Amino acid sequence: MTTVINTPPSLEEKPFEQVFDQVAAVPQDEKIIVDARHVRWANPYGLTALLALAQSRSERPVLYVPEAENVSSYWSRMSFFKHAAELYDLQGKVYPARGQENRNVLLEVTSISETDDVHSVVDRISQVAQDTLVQQLKLEAKVTGRFAMALSEVCQNIVEHAGRGGWVAVQSYQWRVRLGGRKVVVIAVCDSGVGFRGSLESSPAFQQDDRWDDRLALEETLMRGVSRYPDRHRGHGLQGVKNFVASWDGKLSIRSGTARIMIPPKGDWDAEDEQQMQQGLAYFPGAQVQITIPERFA
């Protein structure tokens, strides 16, 4: 049996829940077709989550690629199809990247499976982050180093906790509606590994109680710095990311299993962004992280 998974026109963090809802109802070893023909927009989260989706399936899925030339060309510019070809059977015409487009791509979709990959990502993005963060987002020059640190920490989370590889991508663009049309930088890191709950449960010191679930695992990791490693300093990496994002009025969102934790941002964000914890989401393995840093107004 083959099931068709229909994607929404916009592949971003919240609309992607429609994809997770459909996939959760299909046995993991059943064939699926991901129909992205009518996609009109995808941000770094949407692209990396599509790869994690294919990674999570035991039967190689099919991907119907976007029909719109500008969308397909952008996905090519983001190096999405290079990675997707390893995981999906691609159906439809893939348009090449245009030379003039997407000057705001800070980091194309990049695979992460070991520490050297993380170092490479940080080295690459450090060369372009200064101009974007200082000139476009009007942040202080010192933020560049902390931005690289935050990127390194969320990528290192894949290496240390996922149990398998994942992907990262970074882009800047202008929101036309939200935040008064301000520019933002979006970091997305997605995998389909063991997730935060599975990682903590692998610790020899782990003690489960009746309340233990994905929500508590996220809270233990992000809010209290708990890690599966005995070194008490090992769990504070994501706490540092949380503090960095909060200091620049940004948003940090982490989804794992059936829950999502979000650090409420300041400013003119969507009203639903005030919801710090969501439970009872459709199950999807691994961790899906998005960091959004907005332009700072004087």
Image (cartoon, rainbow, N blue to C red):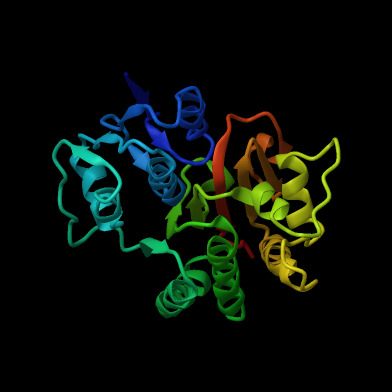
Q: Position of residue 29 (x, y in %)?
A: 40, 31
Quarter containing the N terminus: top left
Q: Quadrant of the C terminus?
A: bottom right
Residue at the image point whose x is 58% and y is 29% from the top: 282
Q: Residue at x 15, y 47 (%)?
A: 95
Q: Is residue 105 visible?
A: no
Q: Can you see residue 101?
A: yes
- Picture quadrant of residue 30: top left
Q: Which of the two residues, 63 or 76, is positioned nearer the viewer here?
A: 63
Q: Quadrant of residue 56?
A: top left
**Residue farthest to the top?**
1
The one of 256 and 136 positioned closer to us in this rendering: 256
Q: Among all residues in the image, which is located at the extreme front?
A: 204
Judging depth in this view, the residue of 254 and 112 nearest the camera is 112
Q: Residue shown at 80%/40% (left/top)?
A: 212
Quadrant position of residue 229:
bottom right
Q: Position of residue 17 (x, y in %)?
A: 52, 32
Determine whether, in the image, residue 213 is placed left or right of residue 6: right
